[in-house]
Image (cartoon, rainbow, N blue to C red):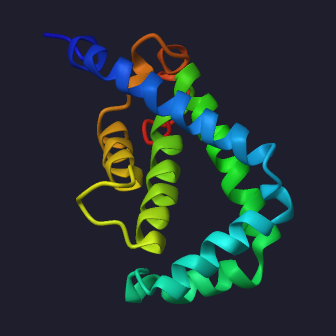
Amino acid sequence: MTERFPLAYLFPLRILCGVILLIEGWGKLHGDWLHGTPLATSLGNWLDAGKTYGFFVPMVKVAHAHPKIFGSLVTLGELTIGMSMLAGVLTRISAALGALMLFSFAAGAGQGLAPPGNALLMGVLFLLFVAAPPGRFLGVDVVLRGRMPRWMV
């Protein structure tokens, strides 16, 4: 059994996660997130509802104080990580950054294991992508594998 066989099973998940992040990032790009207004509203709602996990409240407050910076980071992060997943380029490092971003969303919104909210589930998928990088199957990582450090591809 070669490495390709199990990674082929992750290909549809990689494409699905990439499409979801691209759609979300594209909506934010056209939804004024670069100016920070929607992010400030969301963060304010999270803080008012009191669902944010206690350890993450300081981070949410920092983001709430600087919505333009964090709104841009979220938008560009979703677009970049989504494109990386679709193309299968640097999937390990992109998956690690994606997991960090998605777990931050889940902690900020106070998401638990029950729906609604898919940030926690997608974060776990991205951790799986760090362990078994799916870009090595039908992705650019196949070409980069011998040329880049293993922790990147």
Residue 101 spot, x, y in % from top left: 52, 58
Residue at 73% from the left image edge and 64% from the top image edge: 38
Residue at 72% from the left image edge and 48% from the top image edge: 28
Residue 84 falls in which quadrant of the image? top right
Quick check: 74 above or below 49?
above
Q: Between 59 and 115, which is closer to the camera in this rendering?
A: 115
Residue at 72% from the left image edge and 37% from the top image edge: 26
Total number of numbered labels? Answer: 0
* Relative to 145, 130 lies left or right: left
Residue 31 spot, x, y in % from top left: 78, 49
Q: Between 43 and 145, which is closer to the camera in this rendering?
A: 43
Residue 146 spot, x, y in % from top left: 48, 21
* Relative to 13, 102 lies left or right: right
Quick check: 60 above or below 140?
below
Q: Between 105 and 147, which is closer to the camera in this rendering?
A: 105
Outermost residue toward the left in this view: 1
Q: Is residue 64 visible?
A: yes
Residue at 51% from the left image edge and 44% from the top image edge: 93
Outermost residue toward the right in this view: 35
* Relative to 97, 118 lies left or right: left
Residue 106 spot, x, y in % from top left: 42, 64
Quick check: 21 above or below 88?
below
* Relative to 7, 90 lies left or right: right
Q: Quadrant of the N terminus?
A: top left
Q: Is residue 153 visible?
A: no
